[in-house]
Amino acid sequence: MTIEPIRLPDAAAVETVLATLAPASADRDLAAALGCAFPGFSFTVAAIDDPYWRDARTVLGADGARLGDHRAWIARELDATGGDLTAFWERRRDGAFQFAEWRGCSAFATAATGPGTADFVQIALGRETEWLAGPVVDPHYRPSSVEHLMEPSWVSRDAPTAARPLAGPVYRLLGRAGGAIVHLRSFLGRCARVERDNREARRPQLESRAIHEVARDGAREITFLDAIPGGFDFVPREVRFFEDWERSSASAERIFTHWAFDIRDDDYRGRREVGFIPRPLRAPAEKLIADDTLSVHRLMERVEAVDSEIGLPFGWFFLMTHGHWIDADVGHAIAAGLRAQRVRLPDRDAKVLLRWDDARYIF
């Protein structure tokens, strides 16, 4: 009997799937369509509340006819007025000519590839709708420059439902550097390898550095590497995030049902950088900030309430490592309470928190 190997998703095949989706049913059909295209995978799709808009707009005439690219149309109109911004503004300020733009949010399709915490594939997508956004010029203020016309800041994007949808929603594969389609276990291995290579590349420089140390028995110089033992055994925060999940009570749940990962793999000033920002699929309604007036027992009540709200044991810890919803000082305060035996956590969670308290990481 021949066993067919499971085919991991690739960009061309994913884009083919996305092109087959009808806007009216795209939200409903996406997961199933991906599953059909890649047998052996059961996909789920989750959207993130991170509104964006694309710098690709279309001008519509008074009769609704599409007149082409926004920037090109403005350039032609200005040429027709000899570059006179005031004349152009007076001609179009009645609002008859409008522009449309694509606005969206991130969505992530995920499917398990095995039982391990990092055994899953993630596809980063944009869920986008074209909106009739507003007039081609600010009807109240003359443009101060051509760039002011090209970037329509007079249009509010805070409440897109106030605009009229023209097309979509459609899904497209996001062009994140190295992060559109990722197998997370392989990616974590890449994170560790790149971090190790970057540190090794700096070894000759660090070996030549010395630190002037003053002790009771006199001053001396020690090498920089002697001052930071284990500096080349550094574990990237991305790897630690997954390790902490696997070691904690949160491991009762699949990580990708609670978090998406905004991944990057690119070069910055000649140095390769690989990593991600974790994005919660469910976040608490309010931020939890450390406050000197709150006792450690009160903090415990608050983090337990967060766990209940997001439906995840020890979920507050991972929100804290993100650095937005829960202040890192909350973690330090609870760790101090654990050491003083004033509060308790399940043993596995206590070990994770105390490890973090000794060697903090945050995104």
Image (spheres, rainbow, N blue to C red):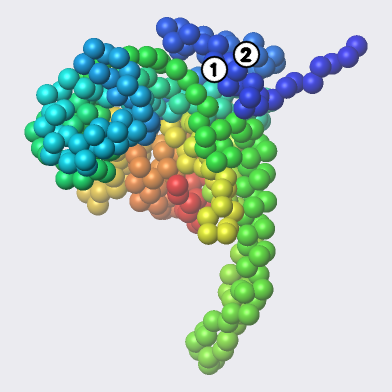
* In the displayed structure image, the side of residue 321 where residue 181 appears, left or right: right
Q: Is residue 169 visible?
A: yes
**Disc 2: CA contacts within 10 A as few (<14), some (14-19) or many (>=20):** some
Residue at 35 percent across and 20 percent down: it is 130
Instruction: Name which of mark 2 and mark 1 comes first in the sequence.
Output: 1
Q: Relative to the observer, which residue lies in front, 313 or 324?
A: 324
Q: Which residue is mark 2?
A: 35
Q: Residue at x 64, y 50 (%)?
A: 192
The residue closer to the viewer here, 170 or 278, is 170
Q: Position of residue 91 (x, y in %)?
A: 14, 29
Residue 277 on image: x %, y %:
47, 41
Q: Residue furthest right?
A: 1
Q: Which quarter of the rendering shows the N terminus?
A: top right
Asked whether residue 108 is in view, the answer is: no
Q: Is residue 241 above or below residue 209?
A: above
Q: Which residue is mark 1?
A: 18
Q: Is residue 20 left or right of residue 280?
A: right
Mark 2 and mark 1: span between their CA atoms?
12 Å
Q: What amino acid is found at the position of numbered circle 2 in the picture?
A: Gly
